[in-house]
Amino acid sequence: MERSQERNGGEGVAGREPGGEGLRLRKEIGLWSAVSLMAGCMIGSGVFMSPQGVLVYMGSPGASLVVWAGCGLLAMMGALCYAELSALVPKSGGEYAYILQIFGSLPAFLVIYTFVLLVRPAAIAAVSLSFAEYAVTPFYPGCSSMPQAVLKGVAASCILLLTLVNCWSSRLATMLVNVCAVAKVFSLLVIVVGGAVVLGQGRGHTETFLLAFHNTTQQAGRIGMAFYQGMWSFDGWNNVNYVVEELKNPKQNLVWAVMIAIPLVTSLYLLVNISYLLVLSPNEILSSDAMAVSWGNQVLGAWAWLVPLAVVLSTFGSANGMFFGGSRVCYVAAREGHMPQLLSMVHVHRLTPTPALMFTTAVALVLVIPGSFSTIVNFLSFLGWITYGTTIGCLLYLRIKKKNLPRPYKVPTIIPVIMLLASLYLVLAPIIDHPQIEFLYIFLFLLSGIPVYFLFVYFQCHPRCLQMATLYLQLLLEVAPTTKNVD
């Protein structure tokens, strides 16, 4: 094995413990890679598609901008709370690792059960479908609806390509994250500058801002749904917590990544939305199926093709970041015994969590078949805020029960309190104000994890055929068990 690692340029030595026993993931994520991973995951298809949803639910342009700013503030506060938890529980896995350490095995299993089987694969499937829609559009000019078989095929190809990249090399995956992040920021700056040019030429819809808060909704449920739409565009603010064991100098770099990435993305989102409102009237925004494309047609003229290209790059990079972080959560859960043992193994030469990546791929491909982008955003956000609230509860529990724990980084107590109240509001308000049967389905799916936990985790019911399959696949995939990374 050591000879094969030497053929990889000596990098394999970094994947061994100092004592020479066991494999571990390499620490290949520096500060700017962490910033790129966080910003790259947040800037996906949401900023090109969600502004319409926020405006629909809020009813006025001014209120929609307030929601976007509020979403950025929530993401910032949540990320700072997670940074403190990461210092106290320095493990990859994000919410799963923190809930396991503080609240125990069953709550952590329910988190990973929903995350691995629904949340992350569904998010990857949705973003890949969005990628496919914008990638295919130039080949079907004037066609109002693309062939579904083509869309699903392109989305599946995107997923398989990203699987290959992430299985081949963690360094290659982080390089792709960095390149796509730069391209995304540049594309958003084009929209911002385009809006400024329109304003300077006196062609903008400035009357929109004179009655900015006219028709603003007062319904708590609709405000909650508007936040769901907006927070979808910030999804990924916690992605670096999933890969802490691969982060260089995590106690400092995680906090710095949060302080750089989230204000940058929030500022860009606000400026992009102002640009949309300057170029398009509220009625045009509400009637457009692809708001960014409508903006490009009015501002860029012959260069309007840059907008679909920007969305393709954004969605591809966002899906890559989801793969990179999501597979690590699956890997950590398997290492803790909450998922099949095979998923905790890494490739003996490339030191990537190949089985976890392939499992995430398989579930995402299944969800691509019946899925559509518009059907999952609200319900994934609903499930996500249940998890976020539980995780913030972990931090408040430690503040009360273990005050004397050494904390290299600490947020003011008011921040996790606000986050917990916001989580409760975003979970309960839509149910109370606008109940839907899909919310019941999500709760039933969550509860279905309880018998699964007792059967396979608590009572350790492992069929012999599963053990044989693990051994066979371990040899076939050339993977081996790992040890935890140490800082």
Image (cartoon, rainbow, N blue to C red):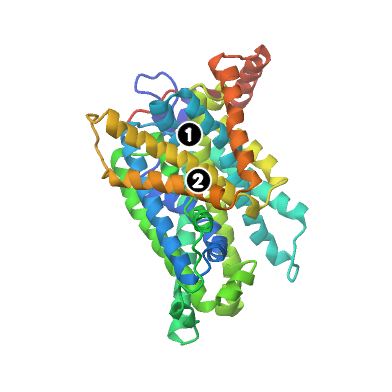
Query: Disc 1 marks which amino acid?
Result: Asn
Q: Which residue is mark 2?
A: 427
As drawn, 215 above or below 252: below
Q: Secondary structure at mark 1?
A: loop
Query: Disc 2 marks which amino acid?
Result: Val
86, 31: nearer the viewer: 86
Name of the residue lying farthest toward the bottom = 202
What percent of the width, then of the height, locates residue 456? 59, 19
CB atoms of marks 1 and 2 within 8 Å: no
Q: Which residue is mark 1?
A: 8
As drawn, 300 above or below 314: below
Mark 1 is surrounded, within 10 Å at the Cα level, by few (under 14), some (14 to 19) or many (20 or more) other residues, namely: few
What percent of the width, then of the height, locates residue 440? 62, 40
263, 207: nearer the viewer: 207
* Residue drawn where x is 60% and y is 70% of the image: 286
- Quarter of the picture holding the C terminus: top left
| Closer to the eye: label 1 or 2 | 2
| Of callouts 1 and 2, the N-terminal one | 1
Question: 423 left or right of 132?
Answer: left
* Residue drawn where x is 53% and y is 52% of the image: 317
Q: Secondary structure at mark 2?
A: helix
Question: 120 left or right of 400?
Answer: right
Res 309 quadrant in image: bottom right
